[in-house]
Image (cartoon, grey):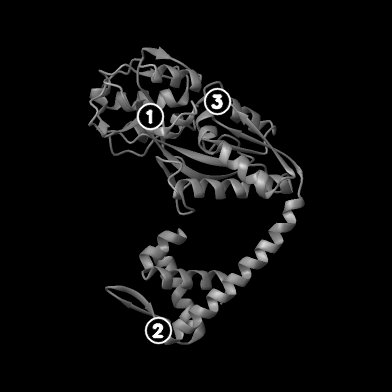
Amino acid sequence: MDMRQLKYFVQIVESGSLSKASRQLFIAQPALSQQMTRLEDEVGKPLLVRSSRGVTPTENGEALYHHACFILRQLDQAVSVARREHSNVSGRVNLGMAPTTVCAIGLPLIKHLNAKYPGIVLNVVEALSGHLEHMTRLGELDLAILFSTTAALDLSVELLAEEELFVILPRNSRMIAPDRKDITLLELTKVPLILPSPGHGLRRRITLEFERVNLAVDAVAEIDSLPLLMHCVADGIGATIKPMAAVYSLQNKPEQWRCLRISDADMVRRNYLYALAPEKLSQAAAIVRDELKHVVRTLIESDAWQGVRLMSPLDSLDPPDPLSATSGPDADPLEFDDIPLDNAES
């Protein structure tokens, strides 16, 4: 019996369902069921009663549940004590993020770290992804959130989150009927668009989706500065296609914007967290890496970072075949892995 099995068991009892517990734990249901079978074999007694209405503990399972909760609470307290020692950790940590990512998590992350680890100085480097990839390869960043699985092959990388791309325009805009919640690619060809320049990864992603259905995308303006682009959108010059985090770039309220889904295209981008190899990662940088993941999870689960799906360890890091991305509407979403160094994304 190990702590992991106890944690799984407690979550199943509290969820009342293997399927709900597997989602909470980010574990495939067959693997979770196998762990519970091993636990029951080790205990030598049935612990769970499975039925069409869900899962309930047996009498022995109920007894184990209360003891397991106590043990897990003790473990959490022990971890908290160990983490309190980290409050004295000091050091400078360089973290690279694209402008839209900074809009979503920059302030919450800094506030969280200042409160919990005041000795850590976080240096946030905001730049387009191409430049951040270059800095990452040179070892100038301890951590970076990028949109490619091949940005720096000698660093550790993990899948963090997946953002949907939306058509963004002011709340009072009449370019698209106010009752619309989504829009098609064909309808978008009749809307003035403000987009990044053609060399950038986000623009390339957008262009490919239009080309899939034999449509051309034209822009009334091409702007690689996120604040200026969003100022132009706010001024009514056109709409844009960006992650929902872009609405925070002008420090105004999200309610002032409309974010429409593109109904006939699967436009998403994946966020990958890069870190120096463990032997090169400082204690301060390792803490920032773990706290960053905690802040991201909190923002997504509280709906403070909208239009984003938290990715689990079950989601593959393998990039899809670039050719498959243009094979039809059911193909996997294209990653940004093959964007040249001087191309970037905001």
Classify residue 119 as left or right of residue 64: right
Q: Residue 31: horizontal and vertical position, in percent? A: 44, 66
Q: In the rendered picture of this protein, how many numbered marks are placed on residues?
A: 3
Q: Give me the residue at 66% from left, 62% from top.
A: 80
- Residue 20 place in picture, x, y as percent: 37, 63
**Which of the marked residues, 2 or 3, is nearer the chain's N terminus?**
2
Task: Give me the disc on residue 58.
Answer: 2
**Camera-nearest label, 1 or 3:** 1
**Amino acid type at mark 1:** Gln
Of badges 2 and 3, nearer the viewer stands 2
Q: Which residue corresponds to the image point at 58% horizontal and 70% vertical from the top-left? A: 73
Asked which secondary structure carries label 3, the reply is: loop
Q: Quadrant of residue 162?
A: top left
Amino acid bearing label 2: Thr
Q: CA distance from mark 1 to mark 3?
A: 26 Å
In this figure, which residue is indicated by the disc labeled 1?
256
What amino acid is found at the position of numbered circle 3 in the picture?
Leu
Q: Residue at x 58, y 26 (%)?
A: 127
Location of residue 323 in the rendering, given as x and y in whole percent from the top left corner: 38, 32
- Other-residue count near label 2 (Cα within 10 Å), few / some / many at <14 / 14–19 / ≥20: some
SS at circle 2? loop
Q: Crowding at label 1, few (<14), some or many (≥20) Cα neighbours within 10 Å?
A: few
Q: In this figure, which residue is indicated by the disc labeled 3? A: 128
Q: Where's residue 293, x and y in %?
A: 56, 48
Q: Front-most of 237 and 209?
A: 237
Does residue 81 appear anywhere in the picture?
A: yes
Q: Secondary structure at mark 1?
A: helix
